[in-house]
């Protein structure tokens, strides 16, 4: 019994000496064929290890390509869903059963600016996610490859962990900025050309990166705001905007007549194809008396417009309402002072 087991034990020990405790297929095959431990060890190290590393790197390459395609598909679906929600909001606006040619021409969703913004947002988001995914996959592949050639990964991983913790503490604000920027892109909170109020500043977005948002305010000042410091965002340019006009009239004015004039003027601008500075996308409405002030009565008018066009529409409405009031003899109040002269001596 022991006589038969000795040769097997001897062969097993020689195989371990030649190929290690976990012999590869190539090394074991060469040892079985030649019985030469040195030759088996050399060929096993020269062929088996590189072959394993090659398989690992090939798997990493294929995995990264598949993941990049999945991320690209995810980005396209994300932007498509955002556009569909915006289109549904427009189609639900009262008085619009379908998007008219005038609204289509405004490039809210289908125009060149919207397409460029959507494309840029998708490319930025997918590029960042793809880079992160590739970095993780290739880091794991390199670590596995280093382990295959006999490098002890324990101290290496421990050292990298210490460095990572130190860098993490020192770069918390930068990491916060990048994460906030990514979520802003995913949620499409705002984009280049939007008029926004971010609390710290307000103005038009000139450029947006993962770390900072660059605004230009009405005075021409440029503001550089780290994304991590933006706690709230008010976007005046998404899907539609609203022009709000408060018009003062004298107390002697026939209010119903004044409201009808304002309504007629606003509806006239709505249907005016020659006015190209802005588009009204829903029939304007006079809400009525907004305030009873010291000098006059305030009437409020609202009109839904294309994004960022509320100011141009409001300016044109003010001009036309003033002209209509002058024609109808409706007086707009101004501060007055009554002086009583005591003539008694």
Image (tube, rainbow, N blue to C red):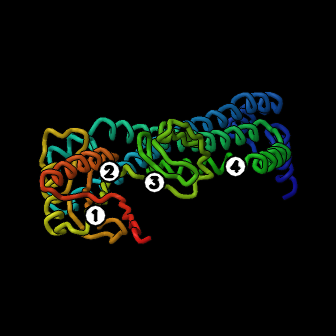
Residue 68: x and y, percent? Answer: 48, 41
How far apart, in angstroms, are the residues tagged by discs 3 and 4? 21 Å
How far apart, in angstroms, are the residues tagged by discs 1 and 4? 45 Å
Contact? badges 1 and 3 (CB < 8 Å): no
The residue mark sitting in front, 4 or 2, is 4
Residue 143: x and y, percent? Answer: 72, 41
Identify the residue under disc 4.
Answer: 173
Ranked by sequence position, the earlier of labels 4 and 2 is 2
The residue mark sitting in front, 1 or 4, is 1
Residue 11, visible in the rendered structure: no
Residue 270: x and y, percent? Answer: 16, 50
Residue at the front extreme, as displayed = 345
Contact? badges 4 and 2 (CB < 8 Å): no
How far apart, in angstroms, are the residues tagged by discs 4 and 2? 32 Å
Q: Is residue 31 left or right of 284 when viewed as pictured?
A: right
Q: Is residue 11 left or right of 57 when viewed as pictured?
A: right
């Amino acid at each position: 019994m022991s006589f038969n087991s000795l040769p097997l034990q001897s062969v097993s020990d020689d195989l371990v000496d030649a190929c290690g405790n976990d012999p590869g297929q190539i090394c074991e095959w060469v040892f079985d064929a030649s019985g030469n431990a040195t030759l088996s060890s050399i060929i096993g190290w020269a062929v088996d290890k590189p072959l394993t590393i090659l398989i690992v790197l090939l798997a990493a390459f294929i995995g990264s390509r598949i993941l990049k395609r999945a991320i690209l598909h995810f980005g396209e679906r994300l932007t498509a869903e955002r556009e569909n929600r915006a289109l549904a909001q427009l189609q639900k606006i009262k008085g619009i059963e379908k998007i008219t040619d005038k609204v289509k021409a405004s490039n809210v969703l289908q125009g060149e600016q919207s397409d460029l913004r959507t494309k840029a947002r998708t490319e930025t988001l997918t590029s960042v996610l793809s880079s992160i995914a590739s970095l993780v996959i290739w880091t794991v592949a390199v670590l596995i490859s280093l382990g295959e050639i006999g490098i002890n990964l324990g101290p290496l991983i421990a050292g990298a962990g210490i460095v990572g913790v130190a860098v993490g503490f020192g770069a918390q604000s930068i990491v916060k900025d990048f994460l906030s920027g990514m979520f802003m892109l995913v949620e499409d909170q705002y984009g280049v050309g939007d008029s926004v109020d971010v609390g710290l500043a307000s103005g038009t977005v000139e450029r947006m990166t993962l770390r900072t948002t660059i605004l230009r305010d009405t005075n021409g000042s440029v503001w550089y705001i780290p994304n991590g410091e933006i706690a709230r965002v008010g976007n005046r340019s998404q899907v539609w905007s609203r022009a709000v006009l408060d018009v003062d009239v004298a107390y002697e004015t026939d209010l119903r007549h004044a409201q009808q004039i304002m309504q007629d003027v606003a509806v006239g601008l709505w249907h005016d194809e020659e006015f190209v500075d802005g588009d009204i996308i829903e029939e304007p409405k006079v809400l009525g008396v907004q305030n009873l002030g010291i000098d006059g009565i305030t009437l409020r008018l609202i009109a839904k417009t294309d994004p960022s066009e509320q100011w141009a529409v409001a300016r044109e409405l003010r001009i036309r309402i003033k002209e209509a009031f002058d024609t109808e003899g409706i007086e707009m109040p101004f501060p007055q002072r009554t002086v009583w002269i005591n003539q008694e001596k």
